[in-house]
Amino acid sequence: MVGINSQINNNIQTAIQNQNDIELKAFNTPTIHSSYQDLIDSYSDIMEIKDNTIAKTIANHRRNKERIGATALGAAWGVCQGAFFAGIYGIAKAIPKMQDIGVIKWFVNDLDKWVARAKTVNPAKSTKYHLAVGILSKTAWLVLSGAVLGFAADWYSTYMNTRINGKVSNTKQGCIGDCWLLSGLNSLANTKKGKEVIKDAIKVNDDNSITIKFKGINKEYNITRKELKDASREYVSDIDENGKVVAYCRKYSKGDGDVLAFELAFEKYRNDLKNGNIKLPSDIPSYACEFLSNAKNPIEAGTSNQVYYLLTGKKASMIDLKQPENYPNTKNLNSLNLYSKQYFEKFIKDFSSNPNKYAVSCNLNIKESIPFKNKHHEKVKLTSQHAYAIKSINSKYVTLIDPHKSRVPIEIPIDMFNEKVGAIWFYNLLDDNDEQQKPLKSLAHLQGINDKYINEHY
């Protein structure tokens, strides 16, 4: 299973590190690319860092540690701007030579206009009064405009993050350890047939609510528009032992309303499993109903095979490349499938020749993060206990999709992939999936796995 207890305990810390990496990039001349979307992403990252910094500062000076809303954040930013304007104005007036710098001259001229207005309204008052009123008026304007812009930005962001069109597009994973879910969806979205699977599983109703259909268990989950909007605005706070907020990060993914709806539907499904509120088919494979009962969130940890089965009703497969210590004695084999390099090589060859035939995800058998570069030459990290969708494989490279930033694929050398891959989960989109189980069942028998185990897991 992707994502064990140690991962669950470190999800927020991982998100904090990702945020810190963005922050370092933002303040050390970030890489700017020609793509319009790259510029939007960079701007969005910097704005979120700014908002989270303000939110942390405010939270650490009050009892309520929840992240304040966008309108309040905009107003708070206006206060910061007002203080900055006043400081620059005061220094520039004390040191006139500073006004030779164009931007500082602009600051001074702008505040001079506000001071002049104050003098016009009350000409009999003192210069200090005019200065104070001018600065306060400018600050009030910045607070008001900041609040309005914050509200507008939140409305736009919520709209963009909750749009439903029956397609999976670019997303960024939140703090929840649901990489298995996002990678399963991303791998389906790589193919024509997979796109149809996703489209058939999601529907917008007349009341604008969303229905997610889990064909594998013949059950539907309804997501209201309010649930979707609230989820898009939900943040997780990391609080240290002294009660201070260390960081905020989004709880769910952002960038695509369809993915967000799937997250909420899987969350409801797993809550039903946990609370015993659902009757499952007798022949359901174990991976389709697995969850961690002690997880902070029900969709923490899993495998993409659960996605494939619930959305299609057909069994998926797994090849585990982490050789168990007691191999070939596999009575205690702790995997959903089996250890087989031979079948892995056969599958990789078939997938590279027929990329539209499979939806595939994987994890890496590594202990420490491996620094790498994506196609934009940006530094990224390949991490352990993390699922990636596999977009394509050729003779030189394997192209991975990281749910932390699905828009920009990562190409790694095929030799490195073969060496580091831990397990792969795959679903045959074109052929009868019962047929693809046969060679795996045969290998399982050869490795000593009994019929009961095979029937439960294949």
Image (cartoon, rainbow, N blue to C red):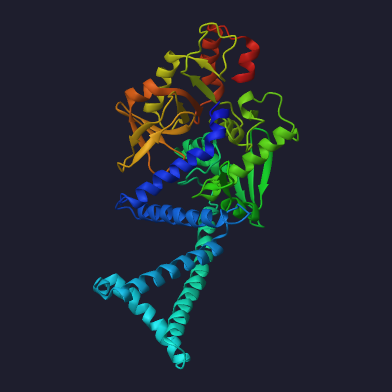
Q: Residue at x 36, y 51 (%)?
A: 26
Based on the displayed image, in which of its 4 quarters is residue 106 positioned? Answer: bottom left
x and y, in percent, of residue 139 in the image:
47, 73
Q: Is residue 407 above or below residue 225?
A: above
Taking 219 as reference, is 121 left or right? left
Q: Nearer the viewer, residue 402 or 70?
A: 70
x and y, in percent, of residue 245 in the image:
55, 48
User: Quadrant where the N terminus lies?
Assistant: top right
Q: Residue at x 47, y 35 (%)?
A: 187
Based on the displayed image, in which of its 4 quarters is residue 365 positioned? Answer: top left
Taking 331 as reference, is 376 left or right? left
User: Quadrant where the C terminus lies?
Assistant: top right
For the question of whether residue 82 can be seen, the reply is: yes
Q: Is residue 341 above or below residue 328?
A: below
Q: Nearer the viewer, residue 72 or 204?
A: 72
x and y, in percent, of residue 28 in the image:
32, 50
Q: Residue at x 53, y 37 (%)?
A: 11
x and y, in percent, of residue 198 in the image:
54, 41
Q: Nearer the viewer, residue 61 or 377?
A: 61
For the question of whether residue 152 can be seen, the reply is: no
Q: Residue furthest bottom?
A: 124
